Image (tube, helix red, strand yellow):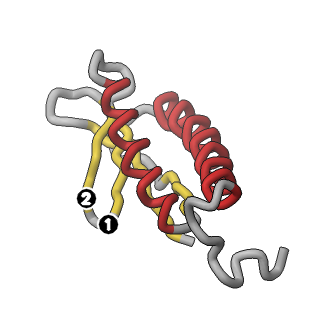
Amino acid sequence: MKVITAKVVRLDNDNEALRFTVDEKEQDVALTSQDGINGLKAVYETLLAEVMEGDVTVELEDRDEGTTAMYQDVCSEYITLLNSDLASARHEIIEKGLAAPIEGADEGK
């Protein structure tokens, strides 16, 4: 299973953002900005491309210094929902024959 990291960070403009790191590429999503929805769409497209290749999970790291606990809590809930959505998407992709299951993925379940 591929692990994608996410972390709450403070941006230069003093706003907070959820930073996703996929294959060393960082994508910031400022959930409180007007462009937040477009940022979420871009990250989701990146994550779906990863899901086409295999199982993916997003792990939320500890927040950066200077960020708020409330923003961390909101992002934690979002990551929980996102991981559920990614698992459902992977299941549907396999079910429709768009990708093959990963050998040994069901072992130990």
The residue at 62%/43% (across/down) is 85
Q: Position of residue 101 (x, y in %)?
A: 65, 72
Kindly give the residue lying farthest to the right in the view shown.
Answer: 109
Label 1: which secondary element? loop
The residue at 71%/83% (across/down) is 104
Question: 85 above or below 52?
Answer: above
The residue at 56%/59% (across/down) is 98
Locate the N terminus and report the quarter of the image it occupies: bottom right
Kindly give the residue lying farthest to the front in the view shown.
Answer: 97
Question: In which image quadrant can residue 54 be found?
Answer: bottom right
Q: Position of residue 66 (x, y in %)?
A: 32, 38
Q: Amino acid at mark 2?
A: Lys
Q: Looking at this view, is 15 or 95 the one in front?
A: 95
Q: Position of residue 52 (x, y in %)?
A: 49, 60
Q: Looking at this view, is 66 or 99 the one in front?
A: 99
Question: 19 above or below 53?
Answer: above
Label 2: which secondary element? strand
Q: Amino acid at mark 1?
A: Asp
Gap between marks 2 and 1 measured at Cα: 5 Å
Residue underneath mark 1: 23
Mark 2 and mark 1 residues within 8 Å of each other at the beta carbon: yes
Q: Left or right of 13: which side holds 51? A: right
* Crowd rating for badge 2 (residues with CA inside 10 Å; few <14, some 14–19, many 20+): few
Residue underneath mark 2: 25
* Crowd rating for badge 1 (residues with CA inside 10 Å; few <14, some 14–19, many 20+): few
Locate the C terminus and report the quarter of the image it occupies: bottom right
